[in-house]
Image (cartoon, rainbow, N blue to C red):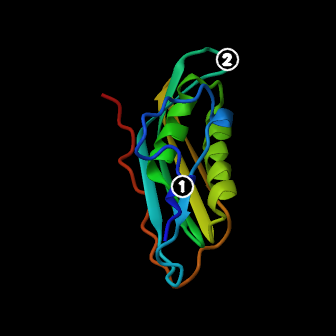
């Protein structure tokens, strides 16, 4: 059963931290530690700032992971992802930073992240990373999004 005392974000009015470093991911106990299954988070409105031009960059971030003892509490994840809004970071840095923060928080059996960055200058950039091979006995859906076609 989840220890509700350790949750400080869920059910409370929470402001968005100024940076991802100041944000924290909260966790809850995995209710099915005896079963391997995939949790998917999709953030189609991820926003950050280009460190060179100071222009906003937008992405669709898809996170798939197989939990072990803990799962990410979703409101804390939303607050964490929102903390990138004023963060200066290249696409690669932001995508991998999200993955590493989740790994630190929950030590998943396996994690995959796809950062599908919307084009600026006509070139979309996609960043993909995973922790290793997923277990053979778990169904993992494709990270399939519609390709960018312009207007």
Determine whether label 1 and label 2 are within 8 Å by CB. Answer: no
Q: Residues within 10 Å of mark 2 (few under 14, many from 20)?
A: few
Q: Residues within 10 Å of mark 1 (few under 14, many from 20)?
A: few
- In the picture provided, is 45 more to the left or to the right than 82? left
Residue at the location (43% across, 44% down)? Answer: 43
Spot the residue most to the left: 151
Q: Secondary structure at mark 2?
A: loop
| Spot occupied by residue 38 in the image (x, y as percentages of width and height) | 47, 69
Q: Is residue 55 above or below residue 29?
A: above
Spot the residue most to the front: 5
Residue 148, which numbered label? none
User: Can you say which quadrant of the picture contains the C terminus?
Assistant: top left
Q: Is residue 71 above or below residue 59?
A: below
Q: Nearer the viewer, residue 142 or 94?
A: 94
Q: Is residue 29 above or below residue 87?
A: below
**Mark closer to the observer (1, 2):** 1
Q: Is residue 6 above or below residue 120?
A: below
Residue at the location (45% across, 51% down)? Answer: 74
Q: Nearer the viewer, residue 142 or 22?
A: 22
Q: Which residue is mark 1?
A: 5
Q: Secondary structure at mark 1?
A: helix
Residue at the location (65% across, 31% down)? Answer: 90
Residue at the location (51% across, 30% down)? Answer: 16
Residue 52, which numbered label? 2
Distance from Cα at disc 1 to Cα at disc 2: 42 Å
| Spot occupied by residue 147 in the image (x, y as percentages of width and height) | 39, 45
| Spot occupied by residue 62 in the image (x, y as percentages of width and height) | 48, 51
Q: Earlier in the sequence, mark 1 or mark 2?
A: 1
């Amino acid at each position: 059963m989840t220890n509700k005392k350790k949750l400080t974000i869920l059910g409370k009015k929470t402001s968005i931290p100024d940076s991802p470093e100041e944000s924290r991911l909260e966790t809850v106990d995995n209710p099915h530690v005896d079963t391997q299954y995939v949790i998917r988070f999709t953030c189609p409105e991820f926003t950050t700032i280009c460190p060179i031009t100071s222009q906003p960059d937008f992405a669709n971030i898809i996170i798939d992971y197989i939990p072990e003892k803990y799962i990410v509490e979703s409101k804390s994840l939303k607050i964490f992802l929102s903390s990138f809004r004023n963060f200066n970071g290249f696409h690669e840095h932001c995508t991998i930073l999200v993955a590493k923060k989740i790994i630190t928080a929950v030590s998943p059996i396996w994690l995959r992240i796809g950062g599908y960055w919307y084009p600026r200058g006509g070139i979309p950039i996609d960043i993909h990373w995973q922790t290793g091979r997923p277990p053979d006995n778990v169904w993992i859906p494709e990270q399939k999004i519609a390709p960018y076609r312009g207007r």
